[in-house]
Amino acid sequence: MTEDILKQKFGQQNHFQVPEGYFDKFMTDIMQQLPEEKTTAIEVNLSETKSTKRAWIRPMRRLAIAASFAALLFGAATYYTSMSGNQSHQASSEMQTAKMEKATDSKSANAENDEYYLDEMADYAMLDNSDIYAYLIEN
């Protein structure tokens, strides 16, 4: 609706106009207004660029060597701790097995034996108490 009012008041004629020949001499006028640039020659010695590159490489090489040693030490420490952890777990499981063998035919020995195997099975299957409860509820 407001468009109709604008068309009635001003018409459909384009009121913005560019003077004739404006763009014919536009480029030359702009080029004349720009200041002239002074060109300067820069001498580059290749020996200087090589030395600056080498100046960056030497510290980076030392940093890379230090990082390699740090990674090697971290890997060795991780491997050592995992191996010692496995040995202690094996020792504790051997002790539990020895305890089981000492027990005779009594009912308490059978209950301990069943509990031991149940714990081992739960550890192997990576089940926690909430998973076991959920399974028992479903079945």
Image (tube, rainbow, N blue to C red):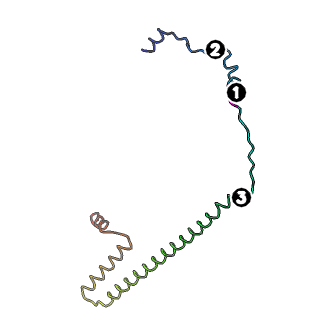
Question: Which badge, 3 or 2, is on the more N-terminal residue?
Answer: 2
Q: How far apart are marks 3 and 2 (CA)?
A: 59 Å
How far is disc 1 from disc 2 in space, using C-alphas? 20 Å
Q: Which of 26 and 38 is in front in this view?
A: 38
**Residue 50: x percent and y percent?**
71, 58
Q: Is residue 13 above or below residue 103?
A: above
Q: Quadrant of the N terminus?
A: top left
Mark 2 residue type: Pro
Question: Is 29 on the left or on the right of 130, as rendered?
Answer: right
Q: Name the residue under label 1.
A: 31
At x 29% / y 79%, what residue is drawn? 115
Residue 19 numbered mark, or none: 2
Q: Are marks 1 and 2 in contact (CB under 8 Å)?
A: no
Residue 121 or 56: which is nearer the viewer? Answer: 56
State the image quarter where residue 66 is shown.
Answer: bottom right
Q: Residue at x 32, y 66 (%)?
A: 131
> Mark 3 to mark 1: distance in Å?
41 Å
User: Any magenta on residue 51?
Assistant: no
75 or 44: nearer the eye?
A: 44
Q: From this view, report whether residue 72 is shown above or below residue 8.
A: below
Residue assigned mark 3: 50
Q: Earlier in the sequence, mark 1 or mark 2?
A: 2
Identify the amino acid type marked 1: Met
Q: Which of marks 3 and 1 is nearer the N terminus?
A: 1
